[in-house]
């Protein structure tokens, strides 16, 4: 295989370019969202979008990713408010609410808002 990984959070779509596997198909933003009925509506192929938002927020916040961005994602995934049919906007809004709940209004919310905006997910 020619590449660095199976997925890249930093640059989705660039993890590999291989003769057998082809080119990494993960989009980084909503501009390249894959609308499909395969893969339960593209949950895996489109995972590059929230993965990239996480990377952007964690990088903006600095420090260890698990201290703030990771904790926010964990809070949303385990908090009981994330519906099975949630879309990216639903998830993004929950991350903003979780950031405020855990850290108050401040740097974490600003980093998330900026990250979601950069990947093209509306939160307002």
Image (spheres, helix red, strand yellow):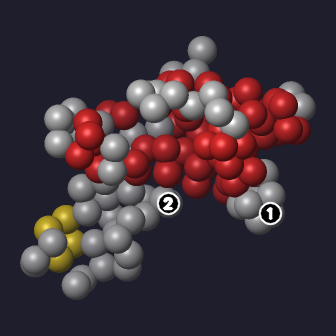
27 vs 77, left or right, is left
Q: Secondary structure at mark 2?
A: loop
79 vs 26, left or right, is right
Q: Secondary structure at mark 1?
A: loop
Q: Is residue 123 above or below residue 63?
A: above
Q: Hey, which quadrant is residue 70 in on the image?
A: bottom right
Residue in the image at 19% along x and 65% along y: 23
Q: Nearer the viewer, residue 77 or 47?
A: 77
Disc 1 designates what residue? 63
Residue 55, percent across and down? 58, 54
Residue 117, percent across and down? 54, 31
Q: Give the CA distance from mark 2 to mark 1.
A: 16 Å
Residue 32 in sight: no
Q: Residue furthest right?
A: 104
Q: Is residue 31 above or below residue 59?
A: above
| Residues packed near mark 2 inside 10 Å, few (<14), some (14 to 19) or many (20 plus) | some
Q: Hey, which quadrant is residue 42 in on the image?
A: top left
Query: What is the quadrant of the C terminus in the image?
Result: top right
Query: What is the quadrant of the N terminus in the image?
Result: bottom left
User: Which numbered dot is residue 5?
Assistant: none
Residue in the image at 89% along x and 31% along y: 104
Q: Is residue 10 above or below residue 107?
A: below
Q: How many numbered circles are shown? A: 2
Residue 54, percent across and down? 59, 49
118 vs 2, left or right, is right
User: Which numbered dot is residue 10?
Assistant: 2
Residue in the image at 23% along x and 46% along y: 39
């Amino acid at each position: 295989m020619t590449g660095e990984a199976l997925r890249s959070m930093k640059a989705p779509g660039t993890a590999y370019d291989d003769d057998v596997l082809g080119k990494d198909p993960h989009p980084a933003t909503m501009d390249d969202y894959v609308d499909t009925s395969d893969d339960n509506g593209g949950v895996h192929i489109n995972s590059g979008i929230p993965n990239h938002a996480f990377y952007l927020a964690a990088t903006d916040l600095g420090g260890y990713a698990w201290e703030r961005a990771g904790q926010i994602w964990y809070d949303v995934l385990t908090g009981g408010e994330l519906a099975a049919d949630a879309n990216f906007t639903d998830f993004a809004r929950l991350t903003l609410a979780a950031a405020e709940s855990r850290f108050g209004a401040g740097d974490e919310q600003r980093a998330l808002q900026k990250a979601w905006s950069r990947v093209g997910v509306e939160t307002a």
